[in-house]
Image: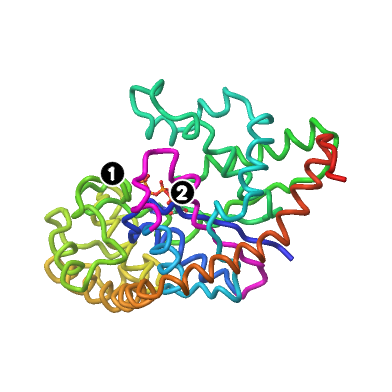
Amino acid sequence: TPRVFSGIQPSGNLHLGNYLGAIKRFVDMQGSDFETVYCMVDLHAITVWQNPQDLMKSTRELCAGFIASGIDPEQSILINQSQVPEHAQLAWIFNCVARMGWMQRMTQFKDKAGKNSQNASLGLFAYPALMAADILVYHATHVPVGEDQKQHLELTRDIAAKFNHDYGVDFFPMTEPVIEGAATRVMSLRDGSKKMSKSDASDASRINMTDDADTLAKKIRKAKTDPDALPSEAKGLEARPEARNLINIYAALNDQTVDAVLAEVGGKQFGEFKPMLADLAVAKLAPIASEMARLMNDQTEIDRILARGAERARDITAPILRKTYDIVGMVPPA
Ligand code: AQP
């Protein structure tokens, strides 16, 4: 069976972009023809400094977010990356397969490292090799991600191909990115040219999954827009990034196409559309926020789910890592 893997960093501020670009689509793929593995990638999160208490809290909160959004820990394998050691072990092998030049081309590294890249952690530089290991340690065939992860997925294929070529095997599959839907790139509410992001200093720029109904409605009311009425077809959104973003969000939340939404709201002013969007967002997101809060009250239950997920994951990852070691020429323990 085809297998899906995807992950999210527990670096705090789980937001609407993570939900629409990732989690909601993870839920949709569950119970279809795929076996699904979803991961809180804490090893990725520490490529930039994380306060230890916050990291622990964010990891459990992300787990609660997955479950509250509809990931069923029985149907899917739900794991915390550091509890499945084969991810990091395979990443080392891939560090020895990937080339420095490949990593230097990654736009996310350039963005996150900033001007003073000599000061970035070695882990931030090697991030895509760990991501390739996350995916390939399951021989995953499909990875649902947002648009921003496309380049990393291409690198995953390059690493698989080079490994297979260097060792003369046909072992790692060529993974397909799954980038589809209206909200593969949710933008900041304050700036239509920047993606909505956990690390944006302005809380008003994003809708957090833990925001209550009032905060949510207020952020949408204050979202940046232009003065024109909404167009009646998608073409009319081309030079209007803020308008396009709000329409995309509406479409994705309501499982509609952008054209279907514009057929209804074309001609309306934002003064009329924003309350519609706020109502929809509250209807869809407030139940998730309250379920997250409920789950967060029982930490031992979350920890038990993660332990069980890790156990199931290792049934898959341990044999794949062992086979990789065999291919590379590592003596098996007697
Ligand atoms: N704005 C977005 N629109 C659509 N999808 C998004 N994703 C993130 N932002 C958006 C998708 O969410 C998944 C998890 O992302 P991640 O946690 O690995 O980290 P990220 O992509 O670096 O997320 P952030 O929020 O932007 O964090 P910071 O601010 O730390 O960089 C991925 O599938 C991603 O595509």
- Ligand 1 under 8 Å from disc 2 Cβ: yes
Amino acid type, label 2: Glu
The answer to if 311 sits in the magenta stretch is no
Residues packed near mark 1 inside 10 Å, few (<14), some (14 to 19) or many (20 plus)? few
> Looking at the figure, which quarter contains the N terminus?
bottom right
What whole-number distance in Å separates the C-alpha atoms at marks 1 and 2? 14 Å
Q: Could you tell me which residue is drawn at 58 percent across and 23 percent down?
A: 100
| Left or right of residue 147, residue 52 in this image | left
Q: Is 176 or 169 nearer to us in this picture? A: 169
Which of pointers 1 and 2 lies earlier in the amino acid sequence?
Answer: 2
Q: Name the quadrant containing residue 252.
A: bottom left
Q: Is 236 or 37 nearer to us in this picture? A: 37
Residue beneath label 1, please? 193
Amino acid type, label 1: Ser
Q: Where is residue 60 in the image (x, y as percent from the top left)?
A: 42, 63
- Ligand 1 under 8 Å from disc 1 Cβ: no
Most distant residue in the right direction = 334
Counting labels gives 2
Q: Give the range drawn in magenta.
A: 31-56
Q: In this view, does 284 lie above or below 51?
A: below
Q: In this view, does 282 lie above or below 104?
A: below
> Looking at the figure, which quarter contains the C terminus?
top right
Residue beneath label 2, please? 147
Q: Could you tell me which residue is drawn at 47 percent across and 70 percent down?
A: 302
Q: In this view, does 271 lie above or below 151?
A: below
